[in-house]
Amino acid sequence: MVFAFYCVTPHASRVATKWLQEHSLDFRHFHWPPKSPEMNIIEDIRDALLHAVENRSPPPRTPMDLWTVLKDEWRELPPRYLQTLVESMPHRVAALVCVRGGPTRY
C-alpha cells in the first residue's frame, strides 16, 4: 500500500488581506513565492515521518495502521530536531531574501 502526504494550499482571509492593505505603509513588504518549500519546516517534518513510515517493518497496511504509526513516530521525533528547525527560520528568511525568492540550500 502506498501512502501520500498532501499539503494544503495556503489562502488569505478577506479580513487579513484588508488589514494588510490598510496598514501597508507601516512595514516593508516582500514578494514571497507561493508555497515556498524553503520556508515550510513542515516539509522537513513530513519527510522525517515519511522516512520513518517507509522503514517500518511490517509496514502499515490500513489507514488506521498508518495513523497509529504516524502518532508513534511523531512522539519519537527528538525535541532538539524540532527546535533546530524552528531556529533555522532566520537563516531561511535571510537566504530567501538574498536570492530574491529563488531556490536556496533549504
Image (cartoon, rainbow, N blue to C red):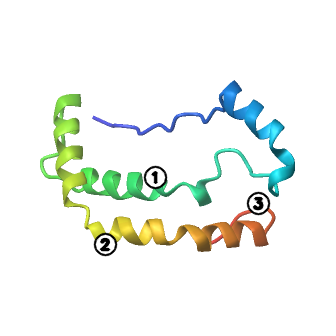
Three-letter code, disc 1: Ile
Q: Residue at x 81, y 52 (%)?
A: 26
Three-letter code, disc 3: Gly
Residue 12 placement (x, y as % from top left): 66, 32
In the figure, 77 relative to 58: above or below? below
30, 66: nearer the viewer: 30
In the figure, 36 relative to 16: above or below? below
Circle 3 sits on which residue?
101
Asked which secondary structure carries label 2, the reply is helix
Q: Earlier in the sequence, mark 1 or mark 2?
A: 1
Residue 39 placement (x, y as % from top left): 59, 58
Asked which secondary structure carries label 3, the reply is loop
Horizontal arrangement in the rendering, residue 40 relative to residue 101 (left or right): left
Q: Earlier in the sequence, mark 3 or mark 1?
A: 1
Q: Residue furthest top?
A: 14
Circle 2 sits on which residue?
80
Quadrant the N terminus occupies: top left
Q: Earlier in the sequence, mark 3 or mark 2?
A: 2
Separation of residues labelled 1 and 2 (CA atoms): 15 Å
Q: Which label sits in the foreground, 3 or 2? A: 2
Asked which secondary structure carries label 1, the reply is helix
86, 27: nearer the viewer: 27
54, 8: nearer the viewer: 8
Circle 1 sits on which residue?
42
In the figure, 62 relative to 83: above or below? above
> Circle 3: is it few (<14), some (14-19), or many (20+) Cα within 10 Å?
some
Label disc, if present, on residue 82 of the rendered structure: none
Q: Residue at x 59, y 54 (%)?
A: 37
Horizontal arrangement in the rendering, residue 30 relative to residue 34 (left or right): right
Residue 4 placement (x, y as % from top left): 40, 38
Three-letter code, disc 2: Arg
Q: Residue at x 47, y 37 (%)?
A: 6
